Image: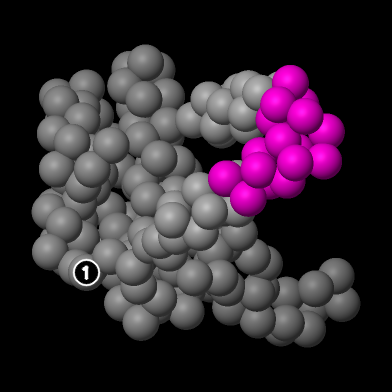
């Protein structure tokens, strides 16, 4: 699924998530995300599934285009929520609170924020990501593989007869089909 297809899938969720928001909380107590305000559980589950798919797709983008927060996010959905927060332009900061321990000593801060209309913001993020270059894929040298297989089959024919070379050919053909 490409960025354009993901954009269309997120746009299709706009109506089902019209009153929803994506809440963020981070700081000394950890990082948390929550899709709030949604009464449509099917749209919510689809949104969360699309977030995982989009987060996994971020692995195709060159790392220099991804912030440290996105790269270090613990899972695909978190990566997606972080990049939507960073580049959609829809993120609004919320309250800041101090975290204190049982003795009343301040141990850190907790920050909050949210994105209203998260499906639309995700669609916009997909559109922005569509223009970024992707990582170059490592090409497999198929000529080398065929030369090796041909050499192995010839070796089998010379040392074990043509029956074994035929068996070797069918084994390699089966492995090639299974690899697809």
Residue drawn at (66%, 23%) of the image:
166
Task: Give the quadrant of residue 73.
Answer: bottom right
Residue drawn at (29%, 58%) of the image:
84
Q: Is residue 48 left or right of residue 168?
A: left
Q: Is residue 20 left or right of residue 71?
A: left
Residue 93 visible in the snapshot:
no
Residue 109 drawn at (x, y percent): 58, 78
Judging depth in this view, the residue of 109 and 27 nearest the camera is: 27
Q: Which residues are magenta?
A: 150-165
Residue drawn at (18%, 36%) of the image:
5
Label 1 element class: loop
Q: State the colouring used for the structure image.
A: one colour
Residue drawn at (75%, 41%) of the image:
158
Q: How many marks?
A: 1
Judging depth in this view, the residue of 71 and 113 nearest the camera is: 71
Neighbour tally class for label 1: few under 14, some 14-19, many 20 plus, Cα within 10 Å? few
Q: Is residue 120 above or below residue 175?
A: below
Residue 47 drawn at (x, y percent): 34, 32
Judging depth in this view, the residue of 86 and 108 nearest the camera is: 86
* Dominant secondary structure, magenta: helix
Q: Is residue 118 left or right of residue 47?
A: left
Q: Is residue 41 left or right of residue 12?
A: right
- Residue labelled with disc 1: 133
Residue 14 drawn at (x, y percent): 16, 31
Residue 116 within the segment the image draws in magenta: no
Residue 133 drawn at (x, y percent): 22, 69
Taking the view exactly as shown, the residue that stands out farthest to the right is: 103
Q: Is residue 93 above or below residue 36?
A: below
Quarter of the rendering occupied by the N terminus: top left
């Amino acid at each position: 699924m490409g960025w354009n297809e993901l954009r269309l899938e997120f746009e299709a969720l706009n109506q089902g998530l019209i009153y929803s928001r994506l809440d963020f909380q981070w700081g000394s107590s950890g990082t948390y995300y929550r899709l709030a305000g949604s009464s449509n559980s099917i749209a919510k589950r689809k949104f969360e599934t699309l977030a995982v798919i989009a987060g996994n797709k971020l692995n195709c983008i060159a790392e220099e285009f991804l912030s440290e927060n996105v790269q270090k996010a613990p899972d695909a959905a978190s990566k997606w929520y972080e990049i939507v927060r960073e580049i959609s332009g829809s993120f609004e900061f919320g309250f800041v609170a101090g975290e204190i321990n049982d003795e009343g000593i301040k141990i850190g801060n907790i920050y909050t924020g949210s994105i209203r209309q998260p499906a639309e913001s995700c669609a916009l993020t997909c559109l922005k990501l569509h223009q970024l270059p992707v990582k170059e894929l490592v090409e497999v040298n198929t000529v080398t593989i065929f030369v090796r297989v041909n050499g192995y089959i010839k070796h089998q024919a010379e040392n074990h007869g043509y029956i074994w070379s035929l068996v070797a050919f069918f084994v390699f053909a089966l492995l090639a089909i299974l690899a697809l």
